[in-house]
Image (cartoon, coloured by chain):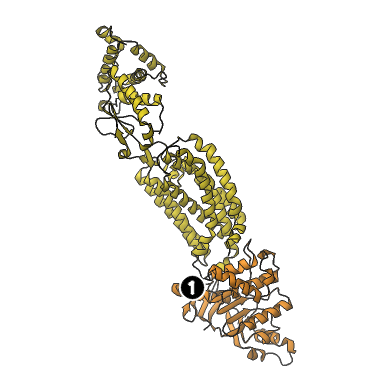
Chain colours: A orange, B yellow
Amino acid sequence: MSIEFSCCTFGYRRGAPVLRDLDLVLPPGRSVLLGPNGAGKSTLLGLGAGVLRPRSGRVARGGSDAWRRRERRRFLREVGWLPQAVRPTPGLRVREHVAYAGWLKGMSRADAWQAAAGALARVGLADHADRPARALSGGQTRRMGIAQCLVHDAKVLLLDEPTAGLDPAQRASFATTLLGLGDEVSVLVSTHQTEDLSDTYEHVFLIDAGSLIARGTTAEFLARARPDALPGRRAESAYTELMGGRC
Amino acid sequence: MRRPARLRVSAAACLAPLLAAWCYVYARENVLTFLVRGDWPAATGALAVMLCCTVPATATVAAWEGGRHRAIAATLAAAARHPLVPAARALVPAGVVAAVGMAASCAAVLPAAAGGPLGAPVFELIGVYAVIDVGYAAVGYTLGRLVPVAISLPAALLGSFWCVGFPRAFSPMWIGDIDGGRLEDCCSTLDRLPAPRALIAPLLVAAGMVAAGAVVAMWRGRRSWSVAAATGCVALGVVLAAGAVRDADPLGDAGVARPVSAMTCAGTRPTLCLWPEQEPRRQSILASVRTASERLRLVGVSVPATVSVSPDDHRPGRLDVPLLYPDPSRADILTAVADAAVTVHEPACAAGDPHAWKAGPVIGTVQAWAHLAVGVTDTGSTWRQAVTAARQVRDRPLAVQAAWYRANTAALRGCTAGPQPVGAFTQASSGGPR
């Protein structure tokens, strides 16, 4: 079971809705969320993480409503969220940081401490476990953020631009990490990078102006590319084709 | 997270030792100096002054921790634990700072009280101090969560210092009660205990502060609503506290009379009722009271068979001699017995018109005379005329003095007769002993 958005509408304060009547069921496996800046990608992930509350509609996972008091805790335990900006806690070391995230998700301190080591190994930061979190580079900080999402064995991962600031080798490593999660975990990744879609993701969602304008398998998405698109640019071409009439 | 991390990253690790040293030195210099040894409630009440040190430190550390949580607000927002759990955990260093500061203060002050063989600290007072610290910690944490540390730290430090330092000097006085500042005056003498309303009022305010912090910590999303709700909680707490204080006693102090049943009465001629803290000195106190009684009796002043050291022991057949410290000096005892024995209250006929009490001006002379009669050479009276007149009376025979005292006492009980000069009794009683 994955996250289900039912007729969700959301707006910040009294402003116009950022998302309108959104219906989305996140499929098992790896999905990518594409869209221009300001389309509502981060808002959608925030709703899915239970951090933002919809004005109307429902966000749930397997019957656990994100905003129903008795079900909220279970919902949050099963969802991992990487926000766009990962800000280290002042003074904490990398492993402590990740362990604290695990503790916040309901793990015992001992379990979180153990799991943090494994999560850091999965994102290639095992050697940095005892460094101050604030001493990490931007890319390393994002990997630490990913480790925070992995530490508590979430069933759903919502990653907001996890590869921003990562070099190609780190992006490849991140893709390997995602592939290693298997199909038991539903992953939704928001990104602007389309080069390696077909290698990593099974589903694509395209959002613009608060509404989903396309959804389907990666193959279906790539099929929308122009016939003359270069092999390495097919995803970009498909994105441009789908967005073309809207810009 | 392992404990060393908490020690490493918390401002408490640096601040606690400094605060402990500061509190110890400050308490010894500014609190202990004015304490009477052997009085536990007085010593515990005096510790309220130390809130001026512990509260700002606690609030500042809490603001620091709140600022750390502000940095990871997104992670906290997605936490599966109840929002109050990480908030409460973040306040542990602030609690440690408060505990260390108060422990150092206690270490400096309470041994003075331990100079008396009986009693223990008033734990209700220490509990109130702890809750006040927690309340300000909650406010500091809330500030840290809401605004950057560049603002929250100085605001928590200075704001909390102002709140615990200044309202005690405000008029109306109940404002000083609601933050616990005036608890230092609650029980500076043996006959006083902390008033329940003086304990409840700061507890209510602190509860309002904690509620405000809890609302902010629990509220996800709409910040303006959370601030409004938190402010409402604090305001409600303050209003409740102020109302409770006002209703109980608008002008009263922070103490109430200690029950006279706590006294133990023993001995003969006279039977002497003492507070437990005075028991070890019963024999010396009794000897001084006996001396005063016998000397007063010689000049015609009768002393009841039972003497009580509480000014509020109005049971019949007792003389209330206010001896309010554990170890009164002989001169204090003689003076107090003399004062109590010759005290005459204003008669009903003089109510509202002091001039109607024609004999009133002789009170000073009677008191100075009684002091001299019991053997106190330094009467302490600043009314030189009264002392001079009293010495003139003391130069007369004892029978004359007794007649003069009886006549003036009778005059003082009504509004018709004026002061009776000692010269009027010379003829009748000359030649007697002096």
Q: Which residue is mark 1?
A: A73
Disc 1: CA contacts within 10 A as few (<14), some (14-19) or many (>=20): many
Per the image, label 1 sits on a secondary structure element best described as: helix
Q: Position of residue B253 (x, y in %)?
A: 40, 40
Decide: is B284 above or below B258. Answer: above
Three-letter amino acid code at the position of disc 1: Arg
Return the residue nearer the eye: B65 or A210. B65
Farthest bottom residue in view: A227
Q: Does residue A51 sit above or below B304 in this rendering?
A: below
Residue at (50%, 37%) from the top-left corner? B32
| Residue at (38, 38) in percent of width and height | B192
x and y percent of residue A163 in the render?
Answer: 68, 76
Give me the residue at 61% from left, 76% from top: A159
Q: Quadrant of residue A225?
A: bottom right
Q: Where is residue B107 shown, x and y percent of the image?
A: 51, 43
Quarter occupied by the C terminus of chain A? bottom right
* Observer able to see residue B162: no
Please indicate whether residue A42 sits to the left or right of residue B359 in the image: right
Percent position (x, y) of residue B427? 26, 6
- The residue sitting at 55% across, 74% down in the picture is A49
User: Can you say whether A190 is above or below B340 in the image?
Assistant: below
Front-most of residues A239 and A192: A192
Count of picture labels: 1
